[in-house]
Image (tube, rainbow, N blue to C red):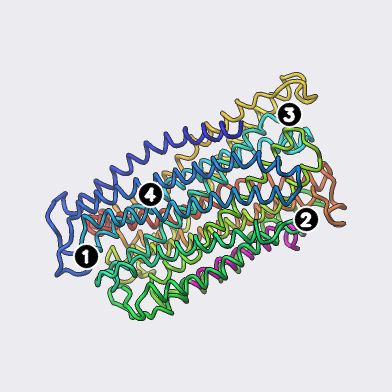
């Protein structure tokens, strides 16, 4: 059921997205081709007027091709990830009969397969594209790497629809199943009597796995593109040093090797025997991969880069040593680890923040909500400082290139990050299958233990995604400012300031859209589940089978319909602002959306994660404190379920989609920069 439901949803979604993709590809071609009036003559290069570069029409054609490549790779990554997950769910449930250790290895290995597949896919397609484009561009590397930026745009635009569509799908089902099943009818979470239960399980695969896969692939593609664009106008590009030029890809390739070694630590070198060893084992993965990666980066930097080179820095060339570039990557890598651990501290029920939230359920849902919101806002502080220090160090050493490679450093352990992240939904669904198949209570306890650890690690994955999104969009912003030939962005000019304030509002508008979509879809789901409980005789006794298909259809229809307005908001904003108000206002919009989007994204996903784990803390009753709040069905537990239900759209729809909003607007502005720089700002030209 899960596999067919998830596959049919993705096919429906990809049909709609395919139409959009073709339309947008035509837009890219028309906008970029019109820069020089579709002429096929060579033009002076942007940064060196004495040299001649390939015509703007070539950039238009190749940008369109790389956009389609990025979109296709993103779709394939999401789809394959989801296929792997649906196969792994049932296997994990079966392995749980033998013990926690066996089940953990199955779930983790499946996650690892997905992680490696995605990291390798992204790298391979990008490398092949660069080499094929080089056949045409020859010596003109500036044009070559400018047209490669379409790859990042394609990857991210698919991720946006995957994330938003999948997020609305999974949460409509989840909220509907929880409100009627757990709160009204008092039946367990994944009880087969609940009509929404299949839709909920399908949703986990579609939202968490396919969405997350596309999202991290998008981040990876964009940070590579941002680094390549800046490098192409630095000494690497000017002197045609191909190895140094591909330094960003070398970092990612070492990352794959490092993650391969790291994975062995979880599955082969140390065996997990008890439940309490699961979370430490996953945390060790992050630490081991970070330490090994630091060594890996040092080796690649020493072998692949000359000892001194110049990096383009807003019109001038800045001299950089190779050890400084190593520090830029390392700072991004370690900032990622810090963000991961802070996220874990605020969302795991092993620590006091979540236990305090659980404790506040004694006095009802209202205090639970207040405590949860406060926790989310507080959890923003350290990650923002980590990002800020990362930006300062990498910018001081190597300008915008430094920030781009710092983002790549944060994403270099993406294979391990994704393995840990995909592990969560896989164990969650294994629990669902155990419950629906009526397996023994002991097996359900084991899958629940796997799932609780998975919940925290999913939050860590989101932390990584948001942190890297902040760095990536800043790097893209720098590349955009250079490409649009703006020397400085002055906040005090009215053009820029109106952009800033509107940009800061966009994440709120976007979140409002996605949350309302989840709310209205959940409303339909609740009504349908209630109708079935009331009109089909014998459901509660287990004699009659509920109508699962209708619930799956409600989720599918709602998510397809509701993902279009938020998607349009993100995709059209840069085009409208750039065309009518020009590049300066657009740079304000990008900066504003980056600054406010990161804060909302971190607080939303941590608040949601904390509420979810506070509920699990009460349900598991593992400590004396937890037992005073439980058992399932008690008043504090009901308050916790309400908190978890409010947190669902925050942590799985709005929060994770926001990081795509920040990156996507920046990469889109970069792709269309030649057009905006030549023809943009129509309104200001009239006055």
Is residue 634 on the magenta stretch? Answer: no
* Disc number lying in front (3 or 4): 4
Q: Position of residue 323 (x, y in %)?
A: 43, 79
* Disc number lying in front (2 or 4): 2
Rendered view: 7 above or below 358? above
Residue furthest front in the image: 268
**Can you tell which quarter of the image residue 284 is in?**
bottom right
Q: Mark 2 or mark 3, which is nearer the start of the sequence?
A: 3
Q: CA distance from mark 4 to mark 1?
A: 25 Å
The residue labelled by disc 4 is 70
- Assess disc 1: are there few (<14), some (14-19) or many (≥20) residues with their C-alpha within 10 Å of its C-alpha: some
Q: Mark 1 or mark 3, which is nearer the start of the sequence?
A: 1
- Circles 1, 2 touching at the beta carbon (< 8 Å): no
Q: Is residue 555 left or right of residue 101?
A: left
- Circles 3, 2 touching at the beta carbon (< 8 Å): no
Dot 3 falls on a residue whose secondary structure is loop
Q: Is residue 353 left or right of residue 132?
A: right
Q: Position of residue 156 (x, y in %)?
A: 43, 50
Inspect this view and state whether residue 451 appears: no
Mark linked to residue 46: 1
Dot 2 falls on a residue whose secondary structure is loop
- Residue in the image at 53% along x and 53% along y: 115
**Can you tell which quarter of the image residue 201 is in?**
top right
Q: Mark 1 or mark 4, which is nearer the start of the sequence?
A: 1
Mark linked to residue 496: none
């Amino acid at each position: 059921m899960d596999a067919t439901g998830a596959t049919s949803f993705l096919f429906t979604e990809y049909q709609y997205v395919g139409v959009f993709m073709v339309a947008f590809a035509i837009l890219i071609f028309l906008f970029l081709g019109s820069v020089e009036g579709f002429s096929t003559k060579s033009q002076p290069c942007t940064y060196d007027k004495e040299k001649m570069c390939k015509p703007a029409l070539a950039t238009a054609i190749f940008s369109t091709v790389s956009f389609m490549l990025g979109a296709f790779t993103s779709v394939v990554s999401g789809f394959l990830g989801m296929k792997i997950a649906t196969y792994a769910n049932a296997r994990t449930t079966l392995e749980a009969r033998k013990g926690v250790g066996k089940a953990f290895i199955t779930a983790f290995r499946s996650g690892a397969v997905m992680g490696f597949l995605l990291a390798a896919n992204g790298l391979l397609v990008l490398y092949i594209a660069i080499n094929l484009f080089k056949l045409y561009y020859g010596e003109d590397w500036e044009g070559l790497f400018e047209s490669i930026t379409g790859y990042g745009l394609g990857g991210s635009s698919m991720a946006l629809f995957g994330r938003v569509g999948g997020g609305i799908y999974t949460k409509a089902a989840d909220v509907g199943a929880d409100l009627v099943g757990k709160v009204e009818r008092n039946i367990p979470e994944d009880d087969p009597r609940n009509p929404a239960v299949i839709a909920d399980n399908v949703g986990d695969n579609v939202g968490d796995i396919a969405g997350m896969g596309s999202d991290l692939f998008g981040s990876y593609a964009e940070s590579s593109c941002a680094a390549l664009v800046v490098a192409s106008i630095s000494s690497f590009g000017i002197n045609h040093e191909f190895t140094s030029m591909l330094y960003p890809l070398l970092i990612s390739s070492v990352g794959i090797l490092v993650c391969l070694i790291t994975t062995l630590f979880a599955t082969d070198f140390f065996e997990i025997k008890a439940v309490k060893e699961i979370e430490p084992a996953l945390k060790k993965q992050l630490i081991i991969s970070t330490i090994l990666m630091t060594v890996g980066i040092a080796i690649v930097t020493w072998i692949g880069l000359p000892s001194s080179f110049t990096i383009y820095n807003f019109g001038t060339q800045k001299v950089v040593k190779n050890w400084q570039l190593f520090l830029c990557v390392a700072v991004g890598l370690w900032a990622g680890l810090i963000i991961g651990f802070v996220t874990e501290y605020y969302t795991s029920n092993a620590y006091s923040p979540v236990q305090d939230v659980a404790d506040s359920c004694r006095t009802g849902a209202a205090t639970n909500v207040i405590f949860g919101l406060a926790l989310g806002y507080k959890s923003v502080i350290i990650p923002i400082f980590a990002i800020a220090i990362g930006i300062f160090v990498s910018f001081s050493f190597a300008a915008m290139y430094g920030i781009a490679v710092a983002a790549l450093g944060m994403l270099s352990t993406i294979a391990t990050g994704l393995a840990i992240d995909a592990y969560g939904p896989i164990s969650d669904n294994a629990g669902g299958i155990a419950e629906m198949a009526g397996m023994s209570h002991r097996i359900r306890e084991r899958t629940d233990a796997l799932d609780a650890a998975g919940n925290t690690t999913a939050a860590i994955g989101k932390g990584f995604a948001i942190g890297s999104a902040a760095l990536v969009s800043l790097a893209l912003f720098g590349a955009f400012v250079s490409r649009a030939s703006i020397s400085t962005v002055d906040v005090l000019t009215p053009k820029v300031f109106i952009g800033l304030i509107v940009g800061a509002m966009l994440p709120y508008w976007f979140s409002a859209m996605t949350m309302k979509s989840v709310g209205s879809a959940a409303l339909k789901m609740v009504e349908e589940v209630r109708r079935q409980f009331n009109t089909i005789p014998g459901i509660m006794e287990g004699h009659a089978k509920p109508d699962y298909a209708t619930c799956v259809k409600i989720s599918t229809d709602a998510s397809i319909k509701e993902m279009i307005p938020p998607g349009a908001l993100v995709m059209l904003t840069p085009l409208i602002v750039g065309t009518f108000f020009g590049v300066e206002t657009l740079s304000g919009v990008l900066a504003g959306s980056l600054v406010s989007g990161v804060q909302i994204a971190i607080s939303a996903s941590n608040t949601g994660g904390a509420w979810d784990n506070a509920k699990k803390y009460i349900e598991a009753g593992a400590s004396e404190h937890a037992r005073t709040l439980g058992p399932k069905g008690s008043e504090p537990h009901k308050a916790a379920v309400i908190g978890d239900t409010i947190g669902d759209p925050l942590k799985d729809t709005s929060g994770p989609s926001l990081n795509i909003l920040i990156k996507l607007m920046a990469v889109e502005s970069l792709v269309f920069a030649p057009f905006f720089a030549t023809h943009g700002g129509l309104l200001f030209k009239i006055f």
